[in-house]
Image (cartoon, rainbow, N blue to C red):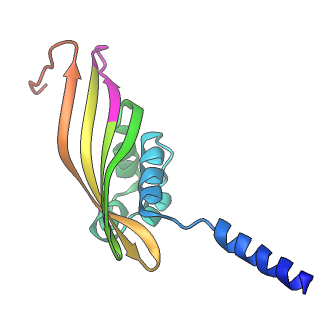
Amino acid sequence: MIKLLILINVCFFLVGCEKNDQPEDVLSSYIEQFLSKSLSKSEALELLGKELKESVAQMDDSDYSGYLERNSFKKRSFRIILKNCHEDKCHITYILKYRQKTLDTKEYNIDIKKIAQIEKIEDQWKITDIENLKTFIDAKNSIDVQEQ
């Protein structure tokens, strides 16, 4: 009887400690890896779904590495401000704050509010769309917007 109780407790413990991927975990993982430029194309394809996955899948290796390299900024913070989930679809609104440096040593603080659509596809959460809602740029010097 005691062995049976111990076995049941161990089973409950193992089931309770099992990591369930939540939509915000998938989003956070994608952003952390993307900003650190350590996100391989195959890893990105595992986290993405639908049209977003198709657009990344169509990139050749040089396009994908250019896609990763275009982010010349240092991440400062990532914060989820709203999570709205219904069954197998979530919309997560978040803010990315980072500092960007240009070649001429101008520095900008940038805040971007985005919304990510995350859907459960084949029992896994996948990012299916990301949209920019608002961008705020704080620059100490003037920003040159002329095309070079």
Q: In which quarter of the image is the N terminus?
A: bottom right
Residue drawn at point x = 91 percent, y = 82 percent: 3
Query: In the picture shown, does residue 99 fall above or below 133?
Result: above
14 left or right of 116?
A: right
Where residue 120 appears, x then y in whole percent? Answer: 39, 74
Q: Tell me which segment is drawn in magenta.
A: 97-107
In the picture, measured across the screen, residue 76 lies left or right of residue 12, that is left
Query: Measured along the vertical axis of the image, is residue 97 above or below residue 4?
Result: above
Q: Which residue lies furthest to the front in this view?
A: 1
Q: Residue drawn at (38%, 51%), measured in percent from left and top?
A: 64
Q: Is residue 39 above or below residue 37?
A: below
**Residue furthest right in the image:** 2
Q: Where is residue 27 in the image (x, y as percent from the top left)?
A: 41, 55
Q: Which of the image's four quarters has the C terminus?
A: top left
Instruction: Tell me which residue sits at (72%, 71%) in the image.
Output: 14
Q: Which of 32 and 77 is in front in this view?
A: 77
- Which residue is found at the position 19% from the left and 32% from the top? 136
Quarter holding residue 52: bottom left
Looking at the image, residue 108 sits to the left or right of residue 144; the answer is right
Residue 142 or 63: which is nearer the viewer? Answer: 142
Front residue of this view, candidates 46 and 32: 32
Asked if the magenta segment contains residue 19, the reply would be: no
Task: Report which quarter residue 26 is drawn in.
Answer: bottom left
Q: Which of 51 and 135 is in front in this view?
A: 135
- x and y percentages locating residue 29 in the rendered image: 48, 52
Give the number of callouts: 0
**Picture quadrant where residue 19 is located:** bottom right
Where does the image place residue 93, in percent across and percent down from the top left?
A: 28, 52
